[in-house]
Amino acid sequence: MASARSGSACLQAAGSGERALGELLLEFSRAQYRARESGGAAGGSAGSSGNNKVEHIEKCCLELFSKDYCYSLIHNVNGEICSHYPRLMVILEYESSDRERHTFESTVQIGKLQDLIHRSKMARCRGRFVCPVILYKGKHICRSATLAGWGELYGRTGYNYIFSGGSDDAWADTEDLSEEDSALRNADSQLFDKVRGHDIKLLRYLSVAYICDLMVENKKVKFGLNVTSSEKVDKAQRYADFTLLSIPYPGCEFFKEYKERDYAAEGLVFNWKQDYVDAPLSIPISLTKPLNIDWSEYQNWDLVQQTQNYLKLLISIINSDDDGGLLVHCISGWDRTPLFISLLRLSLWADGLIHTSLEPAEILYLTVAYDWFLFGHMLVDRLSKGEEIFFFCFDFLKHITSEEFSAAKQLRRKSLPPGFTLEEICMLRGKTVHRPLRRSCGIGHHNPKTGCPSRARLTQDPPAPLLPIIQRTSQD
């Protein structure tokens, strides 16, 4: 296990954190990650330089996780569980410090978890099952796709063909049948009972209490058919024991408007009057009371306000319950879902509550590699369409530096040695700006004594932004 005080050997091998991030982004911009196409056993010999790069990225992620956590692995080497989940899925069990080891004990037996995953994987679209990705105060923050329906369960081959376009809001199933097929309904109900029953067992095993659904539809309609499902519209109310939150958030297509406005999210309001948008915001009053937010105004919020308020809600949820974990999902689980998972990871890190040994470059590498790349975000496709939700995630960090986004207002990020900041690295505008010698602030909460966030990295001559590499590559 790497020393908590030392930098990542994996990132150091690349020459610097900046160079390692650049190499990661170049690989990310080359092609979508798929476990079955990465070849060979992870850690073994690969058949191409691309596979070697992917294995290096996987190795770096494991090293970064190991600096603060004891974990087990679920192997998905050839994508046999899910072709666009990591080949090595990290199941965090407890923090490796002696203090935390005695505070929270692992509640997960990896063999039992693996069995539940195999049984439940068909319950959700594209086989993107409920997967724990963040460990906070002994409870799991999980991600997944939405629930699968009849079309996927009975016709996976046709399903994959239909969804080859890769849109986050692509069809997920075909649940409505013609009248002549109505006789199959009873059999369908039994099948859903079985498959979704396994999904519920997995959720309970991970102690998930809250399910946050980011879909803007109750059921997406294509060619007159309802083609999606979710917990909130499960007719048998199988998920009634969970606290269900409908927090509709625009899909990746909306972020084309964000790019066209020169990456200005302020004043950009989603059109809630579109025909397909029929999922209202629905949050239990017990969860809204602690927050000073007028939720009735949600359709008037711009993209910044909406993202801020949803993030406040998620942070409040994970702090309000001692035992209940959280699941966040959209439709396919690879656009809106990683946006909020990444923001949660970065915000909790900035509070000094998770990944406490990681430097800014390391936490940035981890969230880009694990939360986005290895979980199948289609960056190449999104860039070609101008749907830059990945850009927005990191550009948005400047909007969550105040104390109101802190999960632990009494704590402050410990001082770190000089380096570059998340804000500087994550500027994606595509222009390198040469600044004079100055002090700059990274993500963190405001420190009234210095005018900088309390967990800021104070730097001189910050490096040129790295992420324009993506834009340049996509234009080559």
Image (cartoon, rainbow, N blue to C red):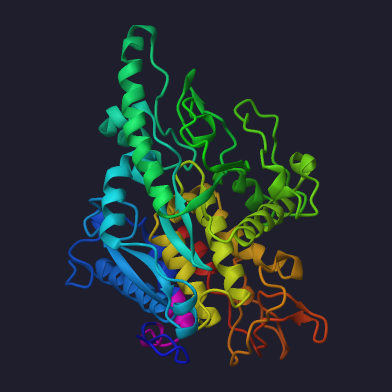
Residue 241 versus residue 117 in the image, above or below: above
Residue 383 in magenta stretch = no
Rendered-image quadrant of the N terminus: bottom left
Query: Which residue is located at x 72 percent, y 81 percent?
Result: 454
Q: Is residue 288 above or below residue 21?
A: above
Percent across and percent down for residue 325 are 51, 56
Find the magenta span and give its range. Answer: 11-21
Q: Is residue 473 left or right of residue 184?
A: right
Residue at figure coordinates x 45%, y 88% from the top left: 4
Q: Is residue 289 visible?
A: yes
Look at the magenta stretch and give its main secondary structure.
helix
Residue 87 x %, y % = 28, 61
Residue 287 on image: x %, y %: 69, 49
Question: Splitting the image into 4 quarters, where does residue 98 fall?
Answer: bottom left
Between 227 and 201, the residue placed more toward the observer is 201
Q: Is residue 426 visible?
A: no
Q: Residue at x 19, y 69 (%)?
A: 46
Residues 273 and 254: in front is 273
Above or below, comparing residue 173 to residue 341 in the picture? above
| The C terminus, quarter of image | bottom left
Residue ranking furthest to the top? 180
Q: Residue at x 64, y 60 (%)?
A: 315
Position of 41 with respect to 299 (left or right) is left
Q: Is residue 341 left or right of residue 76?
A: right
Figure disc tally: 0
On the picture, is 52 further left or further right than 331? left
> How far across and how far down the image is residue 43, in percent?
22, 73
Pick the front one: 364 or 255: 364
> In the picture, residue 196 is in which quadrant?
top left
| Residue at the far front in the pictured view | 102
